[in-house]
Amino acid sequence: MTLAPEQVDEWTVGTLDLDEYLGRIGQDRAKPSAAALRELAKAHILAVPFENVDVVLEQHKGIALEDVIGKLVRRRRGGYCYEHGSLFAAAAEQLGYTVRRLVARVQPQKNGPYTHMTLVVEADGVQHLVDVGFGAGMLVPMPLVDGAVVDQAGWPHRLVADGDRWRLQKQEGDDWTDLHAFTLTPMHRIDYEVYHHYTSTHPRSPFTGQLVIMRLEEGLSRKLVGEEFIVERPDGTKETTTIPPERLDATLRELDVILTEDELAKLLTRYPS
């Protein structure tokens, strides 16, 4: 029996030029290890923005790996979870890591749909949650161990086993807030196509009607949500500024999102005035 191409390489991992990707995030090849995985994930998040501009502009080409490479690597743009996750997973597998592609329910206390792509990657014999596409959430991997607490750019995060699922939590004061919940059931490529279709087209999706751009670094979280520019620090300070249309381009550039003149002009027609 002859296997269909998608059965041979469902994720088309071979499409990725690994050295081109590593150049994009400023990393060299390294043998698989927990330390190397940490540096790889952190470098990816620092280099590649989380952003949904193409969704807002209704010009998203899709999440096939070749399209993701063209956008995030060659055009040096950003993307959202499916783009980040598929790109990082392909690179990690080429480097020799074992990767499981999963789906999470964001803010499970609100009973939203399972739509968020996340990864579990094995390094040094330990499974790690690697969530490079969670916006201003995680900066480094977390060992998949019940009760594990890891500092994420200054904000403590915790993993909690809950039956057959895991909950990712963030400490807020004396409390822990659920960010998302996931199981270890592996997904197929077609699953993400369905999730992406909903997330990029449904009117109730948080990504279709407003800009959502996020950047995370040590001690600093920056977000542009709609027209609100939000800067947060681990000490609890928070600054919110309304960005007028004439400052949109400069704000996008500050967040490492560089648009063409046509893209910016089109975006301004959909931006609150």
Image (cartoon, rainbow, N blue to C red):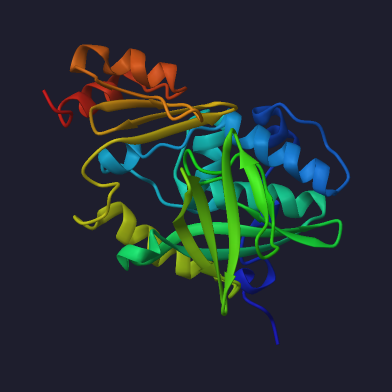
Count of labels in the image: 0
Image quadrant where residue 257 sits: top left
Residue 37 picture location, percent across and down = 76, 45
Q: Is residue 155 above or below residue 3?
A: above
Residue at point 52%, 31% (across, down): 216
Image quadrant where residue 241 sits: top left
Q: Taking 253 as reference, is 88 left or right?
A: right
Residue 222 picture location, percent across and down = 43, 27
Q: Taking 90 as reference, is 201 left or right?
A: left
**Nearer to the camera, 179 or 205:** 179
Q: Taking 242 as reference, is 80 left or right?
A: right
Residue at point 41%, 62% (across, down): 115
Residue at point 19%, 17% (across, down): 244
Residue at point 61%, 61% (across, down): 11
Residue 63 picture location, percent across and down = 46, 52
Can I make out residue 131 in this image? Answer: no
